[in-house]
Amino acid sequence: MTNWLLGAFAFVGNRTVSGLQGMGRAWGLFLGATASIRNVDVWLPHLLPQMARVGVASVPIALFIATFTGIVMSLQASYTLTGAIPVYFVGTLVGKTMILELGPVLTALTLAGRVGANISAELGTMRVTEQVDALETLAYDPLAYLVVPRVFAAVFMFPIVVLLAIGIGIASGWFTALQLLDMSSPEFVKGLRLFFEPWDVWFAVIKSVSFGAVVTGVGCYFGLQTERGAEGVGRSATRTVVVASMLILCLDAFWATVLL
Amino acid sequence: MERRREALVGLVVMLGVAVGVVGTIWLQGGLRRDMRELRAASQNVGQLVAGAAVRFRGVSVGHVDAVNVAPDGEAVLVHLSVEPDLVLPADAAVLLAPESMFGDWQAEILSRADFELFSFLDYPEEGVLPAAALPDFSRLTATADQIARRLTTISERFEVAFTEETALNLKNAIDNIGAVSDGLSEIITQQAARFEDLSEGVNASAAELGAAARQARLSFERVDSIIANTQVEGMLGDAGATMSNLRELTESMNASLGDLRSAAQRADTTFARLDELLAAAESGDGSLGRLLGDPTLAEGATEAVQELRALLADIQENPRRYLSFSIF
């Protein structure tokens, strides 16, 4: 009994200490990366390649998901909105949900798996193969070299990818409404414009920026914390996806509370 | 390779920005032309927000730019952008109303004369259109709910008050009212007939009065002509003589009336005496009474009269038998 209680307390204490250590390391990484922004000569040459990797390469998967999200939204809206509710509300539902929620969040979750895991695996491999140590030995700032361009690339490109996803999602929902729901374009556009406010787009952009920073920041953190070889790399990639997804949903609720 | 990557990134960024910017502008209703600015003032604006449609005769002619409270706090100013070539009615007003049942509102420009029932706010500033807002759906439902509650209360009270006995009494009261109504109807019918008769009499009287008035007018005309012919003095003299004759006649009539009064007193006395005699006769007292009451006497009297007539006839035929005339 005493051993069991001791073990329980030890488990809680260990998790608490490790959690605090992790938060401290994450805070240290954030402060270090912020400080490394001044090394523009180091991170700027790597920004464009990272934008291509994080943004351009993510466009196809983001658009694919947005396309089918728009189709499903349109079909489910027509299934739900029956009776006294006018059919043009399909356009309202598709537009509002794609701009405010599904476009940013689904794209961010997708990129958390694709970009976050990629960054974590890449940096983790560099860590376990001591390439990061080599950079430090060569007097390179590893944060300016590895972290800052990735985070900046995501912050710049996530909104672009999200805007494209929103546009494609609405277009696919519109196409579905015309072809499968016996709606006309004026009806769908009327519903689309009915409750539209420009602030909705800014809301999506703000969320996307924060999601990009979180996905790449978490990927960089777990990648640089990788230990114990290839197994550690896989574990870091998994943790990155899980933690980034959780933080994306938490941020989504946060922004909805703060901005709407 | 680097060049190609840059182009690819640039293309994606431009595409993303274009989707965001163009999409936002398009969803807002497209690029605006040079729109005409209008202002309208209302007590409240319901659920109207910036971006809501502005309609004129059912056609979308613009949008709501802004909605804000007037500086004096007594009204809400609605800023409208409408097509520059839109011709407004002379008495243009703005009606703020729900566009559908789902919370979207619109501003409709209309002629105030066509909607006099609405209380449009006349804002004391040049160029501000009067506006009025319809109650939104939630207020209507709240009012309907209030009415329903009151109806429920009334029905409950009615249910408590309206027992079977009350219903019976009410039925009897209705029957009584029916009977009273029939009686009133009959009375009214009779009164109407009487009124008709009365009106006919009045008409006849009016006709007679008219004739009399005409006759009087003729008489007055004659009087006027007589006066005009200066015969008044003679007539007045004749009238004076006539009056003195009348006075004498009146005095003699007074004397005659005194004689008549005394004659009447004597007649009263005579009639009183006659009543006594008749009463005595009826009671059989006296000779007359016995004569009237006893048939034997009457028959005897009849026979006596007959004998007397026979005697008189004999005297007329043979006077010497009964009369003797001698000088000495």
Image (spheres, rainbow, N blue to C red):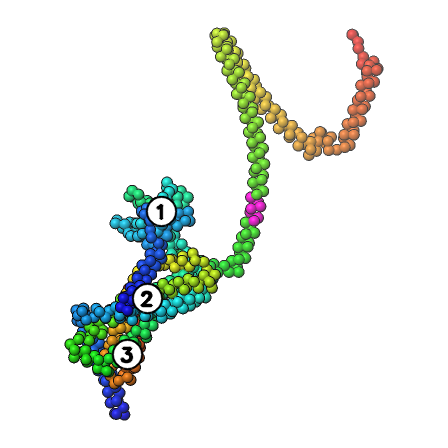
Q: Residue B83 carries which label?
A: 1
**In this rendering, which labeled residue sits more in front, label 1 or label 2?**
2
Q: Do labels 2 and 3 share a chain?
A: yes
Q: What element carries label 2?
A: helix
Amino acid on which the number 1 mark rests in the picture: Glu
Q: Mark 3 lies on which chain?
A: A
Examine the structure image and report whether residue B183 is included in the region drawn in magenta: yes
Q: Is residue B159 visible to the viewer in this orientation of the structure?
A: yes
Q: Quadrant of the C terminus of chain B?
A: top right
Q: Residues within 10 Å of mark 3 (few under 14, many from 20)?
A: many
The residue under the point 35% across, 66% down is A165
User: For mark 2, what is the residue?
Assistant: A162
Query: Which quadrant does the N terminus of chain B fall into?
Result: bottom left
Give the extent of the magenta segment.
Answer: B178-184
Residue B140: mark: none
Q: x, y percentage for residue A82?
A: 46, 63
Q: Where is residue A159 in the image (x, y as percent from the top left)?
A: 30, 66
| Residue B118 in view, yes or no | no
Q: In the rendered structure, does residue B17 fall within the stretch colored magenta?
A: no
Residue A15: percent from the left, percent from the top? 24, 83
Q: Mark 3 points at which residue?
A: A121
- Is label 1 in a helix, a strand or a loop? loop
Given residues B178 and A109, the one toward you in this image is: A109
Task: Identify the element where label 3 is drawn.
Answer: helix
